[in-house]
Image (cartoon, rainbow, N blue to C red):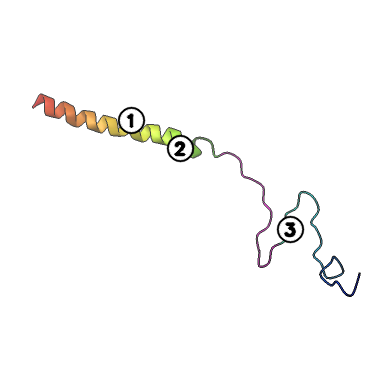
Amino acid sequence: MNPKRPHEAGAGSEQLSPPGETPAAEGSTAEAHRERPDGGLWEHPHLWLFLLAVGGLLVAAFFLVRMVTL
């Protein structure tokens, strides 16, 4: 290490993390975690959107039929 250039890599520099590991961050308390598996039926927004749309159409159809039959 050259004493005239203290900013170059040396004893005080931060070491690189091994491949596949996340480097530590200042103030970080989080740990690496596994990604959880798919939640199945409960985590599919298109299904819920479809069910809400069908429910709304059924309610609208009910009131339209009532208006027509009066």
Q: Which residue is mark 2?
A: 45
Crowding at dot 1, Cα within 10 Å, few <14 / some 14-19 / many 20+, comes out as: few
The reply to whether the C-beta atoms of the residues labelled 1 and 2 are less than 8 Å apart is: no
Query: What amino acid is labelled 3 in the image?
Result: Pro
Per the rendering, the mark at residue 23 is 3
1 or 3: tag closer to the N-terminus: 3
- Choose between 41 and 44: the one closer to the eye: 44
From the viewer's perspective, is the residue at label 2 or at label 3 nearer?
3
Mark 1 sits on what residue? 54
Looking at the image, is 55 positioned above or below residue 12? above
Residue 28 lies in the magenta-colored region:
yes
- Residue at image position (72%, 61%) is 24
Q: Which mark is residue 68?
A: none
Earlier sequence position, callout 2 versus callout 3: 3
- Outermost residue, right direction? 1
Q: Provide the major secondary structure of the magenta segment.
A: loop
Q: Give the side of residue 8 with respect to residue 37, left or right.
A: right
10 in the magenta segment: no
Which percent across, then down, holds residue 22? 72, 54
Start and end of the magenta stretch? 25-38
- Residue at left offset 82%, top offset 62%: 15
The CA distance from mark 2 to mark 3 is 34 Å
Q: CA distance from mark 1 to mark 3?
A: 48 Å
Most extreme residue toward the top, as rendered?
Answer: 69
